[in-house]
Image (spheres, grey):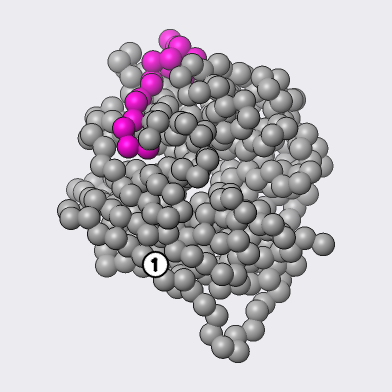
Amino acid sequence: MAALTLTMAAGCTASGTAQVVINGWRSVPPPSPDARVLAIVPDGKGLLVLGSVPGPAGRAPGAWTTTDGRSWHSVPLIPHTVYAGQAELIAVGAAAGRITVLGQAFGGAHSNPRLTFWTGSTGILVEHEQPFEMFGGPHAIATNDAAALPDTALMVGQWDGPTGRYGAAVWTSADGVTWHRDADDPALASAPGEQTSALGAAAGPDGFLVAGDTLRGALLAPLVWTSPDGKAWRRIALPTTSEGATANRAACDDSSCVVAGVALGSQWHARCWPLVGAVAGTGTSGPGGTTMRVSQVLLHEREALIALRVNDKARLESTARDCAGWRDVPLPITSDEVRIGELPDGLLLATTDETTSRLWLRTSP
């Protein structure tokens, strides 16, 4: 497919349209009509927002920057493959001005996920087609999240290794163009009698942090892996209950990291663990539900904001940095998913459903 630059127009509020304030959240225009927001990360003094817009084949990728949540600048996108032009941008790692993005479309005879990989800056993002069996092919299981250090981009997921036991895998790249897969590191790979999974990724001053789990028999136990550079990994078991748990997402800043996941049992409960260096706290349990998944963790001032999907609906919780004191943060509307980012004067929230997102601002006191 010939390269095609996609430039998404910024959305604007029609003259005279009133803003809505619900539960302290003020509605603001989306970056583009019917945009779906699926990832938000810091970008200098503002935010990089990624997702999709309506396209000729269903959806098309979209990316924007903002410093205030009201005015938007579109990031030009250059896809090189058919599926890149149909992709939603779902995960991103950003560091030192360089951005690496994971896109996903569905297609083929079985409508399997078709992954696309983009790199660049807020000036332009370019898709780089990968060898078929780097992220796909008969041994592929999943690619779940992205993170970045100034000199290394990281993707995490699962791979069906040479032992026949699929396990946690990482992909690293110095330029976002050429990738190296590691599914054989002893800390990552499944040992006899277990299956490891890498589900979430974050980066901090000590390097990379990957959240996931190990399944031994019927017991699922939460894990994190740490690495200063993405080359050598250390496995750290997180405290859990007798019924087991999984770690889904993580976030780090200059002082510490917070890992969030789900504790299993007759009812599932959100779970939070503080992590300082290689020392994990005992953790605390939050709200419960029949089904649950952690979508995002954001460290904001003295708290950790944890975006959940509980019983197929979005929920936002706040804890202290040590995971104490769970508190529900009322959302403006009911939605399937939420994503959240920190702006200089407050928080930007995206409430997302199957076809569109609504955006909201909460300014700091």
Residue 38 x/y as whole percent: 49, 54
The magenta span reads 176-195
Which of 70/292 is in front? 70
Magenta portion: prevailing SS class? loop
Q: What residue type is labelled 1?
A: Met
Q: Is residue 281 left or right of residue 261?
A: right
Residue at the image position 55 percent from the left and 22 percent from the top = 228
Q: Quadrant of the C terminus?
A: bottom right
Residue at the image position 30 percent from the left and 15 percent from the top = 162
Dot 1 alpha-carbon crowd within 10 angstroms: few under 14, some 14 to 19, many 20 or more: many
Q: Dot 1 corresponds to which residue?
A: 8
Residue 179 counted in the magenta span: yes
Residue 172 higher or lower than 191, as above or below: below
Which of 296/363 is in front? 363
Residue 37 visible in the picture: no
Residue 313 x/y as whole percent: 58, 56
Residue at the image position 28 percent from the left and 53 percent from the top = 79
How many numbered marks, from 0 up?
1
State the SS at label 1.
loop
Residue 183 counted in the magenta span: yes
Q: In this view, does 325 lie to the left or right of 356?
A: right
